Amino acid sequence: MRIAVDAMGGDRAPDEIVAGALDSCEEPGHELILVGQPDAIRACTAGRKFPAERVEVRPAAGVVGMGESPASSLKRRETSIAVAVQLVRDGEAQAVVSAGNSGAFMAHATLRLATIEGVERPAIAIVVPALAGPRVLLDAGANASCRPEHLVQFAHMGAVYARDVLAIPNPRVALMSIGEEASKGSGLTKAAHRMLSDLGEGLNFVGNVEGDTVFADVADVVVCDGFTGNVFLKTAEGTAEALMEGLRAAITSSLRAKLGAFLIRGALGKFRRLFDYATYGGALLLGVNGICVVGHGRSDARAVKAAISVAKRAVETRVVEEIAASCRAIEAPTRLPESAGAAVGAGAPTGGG
Amino acid sequence: MRIAVDAMGGDRAPDEIVAGALDSCEEPGHELILVGQPDAIRACTAGRKFPAERVEVRPAAGVVGMGESPASSLKRRETSIAVAVQLVRDGEAQAVVSAGNSGAFMAHATLRLATIEGVERPAIAIVVPALAGPRVLLDAGANASCRPEHLVQFAHMGAVYARDVLAIPNPRVALMSIGEEASKGSGLTKAAHRMLSDLGEGLNFVGNVEGDTVFADVADVVVCDGFTGNVFLKTAEGTAEALMEGLRAAITSSLRAKLGAFLIRGALGKFRRLFDYATYGGALLLGVNGICVVGHGRSDARAVKAAISVAKRAVETRVVEEIAASCRAIEAPTRLPESAGAAVGAGAPTGGG
């Protein structure tokens, strides 16, 4: 298994990206193609111990800026994102990981790899940590506006991800809304609720959840439009950061508290890791013909290593093929095979950065 | 100043509601009308010390159930919510506080008090705690779907609230979206961004914020549709609860950690209060002709006391009159006075519960 890593993408590229990639070689079972400016990459690998036979450097002259528009990035085929995605398209790599401009990454992935038959829009699937176990939430920002049938497709893709990658048997799928009752919510959620309820045994649909019940033991997969999902993701991150900052201020406010803080340091570290995005590594872009892991822009080495591990699990469990099978099974009765071609471009991502 | 309190509304009614109301009398400057079943209320006041001359009991035979639909509750004029709102309409009270069925409360308030001239939809304004200072966010759930002009009206109402009630001079107003750039977001947010930018000096519009930057020192007022605002509110609550639960588990995991936890207990208490909804008391329903404070369904005595304090500040600072003046100033150039009647019913609330 070969994994292409965009060495130039992310706030801390290339140092932390390359470091995390090399760290991933502590585990067997994969080879790396580090894509980017060879000199910059070699400056990061110099003096480090790693299995050279498992690491290849593939030159890419350009870098997509973090603020660059996805549309303009598509014209530049020489960037590290473009070259890394192309490696998957050409079959040289089985997965691609980038912590760079996520809008550009999604645009390249959608255009070059095309969407899976039966999927109109690719979606970003994130893993939400919760004490009762991890949840999958999608879309976390690929599509700012969605139609109800997109949410149904997200539901199928999320269920496959939860079942195969997270090993949750018969995952419970819920719809994000602003009340538990089917009658609560927007026009989009009410229509999606009807369509999801009508699927019957094809999907273990458990109804609506709200922003707080996502963390309860109610559902394993949560679907929503990309605007709502991105608000959820950023709000959860922002709340956690504000709380940790407040906690830090509180436990350093007196000598007594400082001593207490010293004693709970170890316990607090474990707790932090449970809620730290770096533990989960990256989001999967589901719905395209290839494994694409979208890393957090702030990814450090630990996050990159975790992202590579997510990519490996997705390849091993054949997520793309399983999603294709799941969406084919649903679409088959109502669609003629010849009309079911991949709608390239229809799913052009709008969110991210 | 007389404040009507729905003694029967909320998960912990009537005990905690009545207790919180009586506690509010530790402060001077207001009288209370406790609305509900007299026997139930008297059972709660019995044996308690309070200034009897400042507390009146107003009988109301019925109670709106927490799961009852707002529409069906409107037919029942004998409920504690209906009677309490009617007291404001009749001028017997200057404000009403209820922790009961929020959808029913909003429906009664919108229908009986009518919306302020120039406001098409009332909105729920919440106070979001942040280390840099409190923020106002609206709409937190009254309107699941909004048009861009509604968000502009929310911006004006939120700015008045921040300026007058929270004493923030020239409050910075932002739009919740999924990227800082004007080009990011949904059709609604892009259109609202244009309209807010066009207001010029009428409003201190600072652009987009995201779910995490709400907590940063970027904006004092954040506007969004009620679906997005409710997702924000519930996600922040859920994240905070999950973190506190994780923290509790971590600091009781060993004897060493337990000792540390004991030492930081005092500091942790202060930290908890900063992020506890009960500290902030309740949300204001802005845009109706009367001060309505929507309490959290789980309100305890402390939250009720805080909600009454919010109501008092809103009455003292004449929020309704200030919003009317602010919206009149904006609407005047483009609307004829005779077309600007209050659109009763157009703002029927859809969220809450």
Image: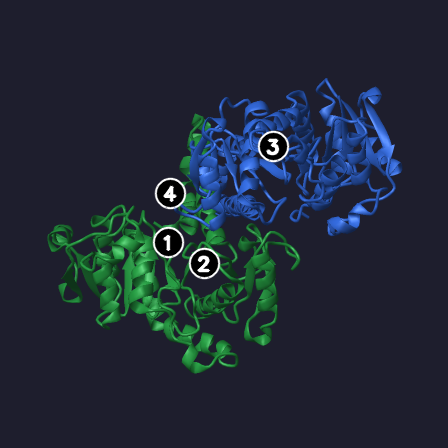
Chain colours: A blue, B green
Mark earlier in primary sequence (2, 1)? 2
Circles 1, 3 touching at the beta carbon (< 8 Å): no
Provide the chain ID for the residue under circle 3.
A
Asked if marks 3 and 4 touch (Cβ < 8 Å), the reply is no
Q: Judge if badges 2 and 4 mark residues of a common chain.
A: no
Q: Is residue A137 visible?
A: no
Q: For marks 2 and 4, give the CA distance.
A: 20 Å
In front of the other: label 1 or label 3? 3
- Label for residue B279? 1
Mark 3 or 4, which is nearer the eye?
4
Q: Residue at x 40, y 42 (%)?
A: A182
Whether residue A349 is visible to the viewer of this picture, yes or no, is yes
Disc 3 marks which residue? A280
Please state the chain letter of the residue tagged with numbered disc 2 in the rendered image. B
Q: Quadrant of residue A9?
A: top right
Residue B109 against residue B260 in the figure, above or below = below
Q: Nearer the viewer, residue A32 or B347?
A: B347
Q: Which residue is mark 2?
A: B139
Which residue is labeled 4 in the image?
A: A181
